[in-house]
Image (spheres, grey):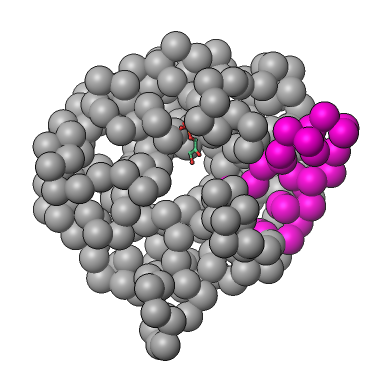
Amino acid sequence: MRKLVVGNWKMNGVASDLAEIAAIAEKSLSYPAVESALCLPATLISRACDIAQDLPIGGQDCHIQPSGAHTGCVSADMLVDAGASLTIVGHSERRAAQHEQDHEVLAKAQAAHKAGLKVIICVGETLAERDAGNALHIVLGQVAGSLPQNISGDWLSVAYEPVWAIGTGRIPEMADVREMHGAIRAALVDRYGTIGNSVRILYGGSMNGDNAAELLAVENVDGGLIGGASLTCAKFEPILAAAQAFGE
Ligand SMILES: O=C(CO)COP(=O)(O)O
């Protein structure tokens, strides 16, 4: 399974950043053993697609409905219309700030899949939950509630992003990453059978060029979801290079 390395630009990026996107797209061609993508603000998707060459461009959320009276929202069909081929759903920043629940994340994932998008569903525990010894319970509960009952094809990935590692420069112990990814894998196989072995499980949270090789070497870490270090080609490329070293 090729590693999947996805940049999440969050609420960053304006027209003057298109050159950076073009540079990332150009560099990504040099790492054919890596599947890479950038999830951008909706306002940039169409223009980014014009310059992205082979680099897939995605959104960061979508509404559960294809259209309608939902002021300020963007549907999966609109992401497709803009040129996107994937989207993130259920990011912890949305679970926290927009109070998204597992059942809404599931509905968004299904809407995105119906529209033809690949989907990355995010899960992850807070520091208080980890300190209380509840990390596995919380994350497996999110997996149970946010993922569809059945899947076919390769449209789904899961991103394990410990909330306390996002944007903090802190990453978990590798043993904890191994334990969590192994538990998510077991849940996927339990739910989907052998297809569960081909669902990628990404790690996200302060991944950068210095720690990517170590994180990507952990069993069941099939790629990364990268925030801050995806905003420039100079910071993103070393992560692509680390992923390339794992080959096909
Ligand atoms: O939230 C993340 C990706 O979705 C991770 O963000 P950072 O890489 O900035 O910690």
Asked if the magenta segment contains residue 168, the reply would be no
Q: Is residue 76 left or right of residue 19?
A: right
At which x and y percent is residue 240? 35, 24
Of the pair 168 and 218, the residue shown nearer to us: 168
Residue 222 visible in image: no
- The extreme bottom residue here reads 69
The image shows residue 20, relative to residue 173, as above or below, that is: below
Q: Main secondary structure of the magenta part?
A: helix
Q: How many marks?
A: 0
At which x and y percent is residue 223? 49, 32
Q: Residue at x 38, y 22 (%)?
A: 239
At which x and y percent is residue 86? 39, 55
- The extreme right residue here reads 133
Q: Residue at x 42, y 35 (%)?
A: 227
Q: Within the image, what quadrant is residue 37 found in?
A: top left
At which x and y percent is residue 35? 37, 36
The image shows residue 191, relative to residue 10, as above or below, that is: below
Of the pair 226 and 110, the residue shown nearer to us: 226
Q: Within the image, what quadrant is residue 107 found in?
A: bottom right
Q: Residue at x 44, y 66 (%)?
A: 62
Asked if the magenta segment contains residue 129, the reply would be yes
Residue interval drawn in magenta:
122-147
Q: Quadrant of the C terminus?
A: top left
Q: Is residue 144 left or right of residue 239?
A: right
Q: Residue at x 40, y 87 (%)?
A: 68
Of the pair 145 and 74, the residue shown nearer to us: 74
Residue 104 visible in image: yes
